[in-house]
Amino acid sequence: MTKAGRLKSGLLFLAACSITFVMGCHTSAQFLTPDKTVLYINNRPFVLGPNGGRVVTRPFFWHAAGGIPYRIEKGGVMIQSGKLSSSFRIASIFWPPFALIYWPIGFQSSHMVYDLNNDPNAQTYAPPQEPPPQAQ
């Protein structure tokens, strides 16, 4: 292999590693929460906007395989708690070192919207809505 070929292969390898690293170190989802509340996901606080917002966090350990624990507090008083649906992250198989052991669980989908306004147990979720097609 020529020197230019090795350089090209090396750059492609580094690009693939970078993409895998970025994909493997976070999980995210959109949340709709009551006004003036603090959302705690796995005991980590997230202050969102008046109608909610996007939460980006580290993936979760195996204990979250049955659901990611959350609670909502308003003025220091818990007003709601439950578990969010979760899923196994395929990226954890490839993300070194050993993400399969300690970071295998994430939110069910990064395109999901968890509506915590109406569902007291957060067992269901609302997928993002597509705008209706325009009549011509």
Image: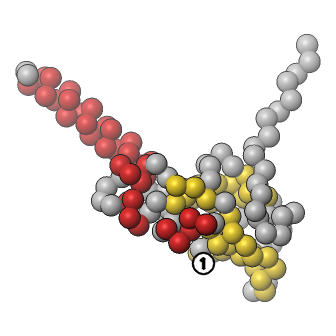
Residue 36: image quadrant is bottom right
Q: Is residue 78 left or right of residue 5?
A: right
Is any part of residue 99 visible from this angle? yes
Residue at 79% of width from left, 35% of height from top? 130
Element type at mark 1: loop
Picture residue at 34% right of the left edge, 44% below the top: 18
Q: Look at the picture and state if 103 lies above or below 82.
A: above
In the rendered structure, the answer to whether residue 102 lies left or right of residue 105 reads left
- Residue 107 lies, with reference to residue 3, above or below; the image says below
**Left or right relative to 90: residue 44:** right
Residue 107 appears in the picture as rendered: no
Q: How many marks?
A: 1
Q: Position of residue 127 (x, y in %)?
A: 75, 46
User: On the image, numbered disc 1 is attached to which residue?
Assistant: 43
Name the one closer to the observer, 98 or 19.
98
Could you tell me which residue is drawn at 26 percent across and 40 percent down?
A: 14
Residue at the image position 92 percent from the left and 18 percent from the top: 135
**Could you tell me residue 12's position as x and y percent?**
27, 32
Most foreground residue, 44 or 47 = 44
Query: Residue furthest toward the top?
Result: 136
Give the residue furthest to the front.
66
Disc 1 residue type (three-letter): Asn
Q: Quadrant of the C terminus?
A: top right
| Relative to 120, residue 87 above or below | above
* Quarter holding residue 125: bottom right
